[in-house]
Amino acid sequence: MTYKTKGTCSQMIEFEITDGKVHNVKFTGGCNGNLKGIGQLVEGMDAEEVIKRLEGTTCGFKSTSCPDQLAQALKQALHA
């Protein structure tokens, strides 16, 4: 799935969900190393658990963050 982010430095997130597990997360834009790290940390995790852990994370004075946007993308994919 491809998700266009809102309110973050990254512009897009690509990922797959297979049998409820998150795979191949790739962010476009944003803080390259940190976002690669997030992708590696969530690899193979249950999508609902990723949402639970990342949803609501903020960045500076922004009301969202790249991790929060990943949670929103996963929610959208699961409920599509």
Image (tube, rainbow, N blue to C red):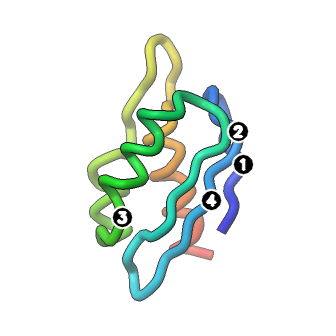
Q: CA distance from mark 1 to mark 3?
A: 20 Å
List the single residue furthest toward the front: 33
Q: Give the mark nearer the N terminus: 1 vs 4.
A: 1
Name the side, left or right, on which 18 lies relative to 1: left
Q: In the image, which disc is placed on residue 43? A: 3
Q: CA distance from mark 3 to mark 2?
A: 20 Å
Task: Give the quadrant of residue 10.
Answer: top right
Q: At which x and y percent is residue 57?
A: 37, 33
Residue position marked by numbered label 2 in the rendering = 11
Q: Give the mark nearer the N terminus: 1 vs 3.
A: 1
Residue located 69% across and 61% down the image: 2
Q: Residues within 10 Å of mark 3 (few under 14, many from 20)?
A: some
Residue located 30% across and 68% down the image: 45
Three-letter residue code for mark 2: Gln
Q: CA distance from mark 1 to mark 2?
A: 6 Å
CB under 8 Å between discs 3 and 4: no
Three-letter residue code for mark 3: Glu
Q: Residues within 10 Å of mark 1 (few under 14, many from 20)?
A: few
Q: In the image, which disc is placed on residue 73? A: none
Residue position marked by numbered label 1 in the rendering = 4
Residue located 36% across and 54% down the image: 40
Three-letter residue code for mark 4: Glu
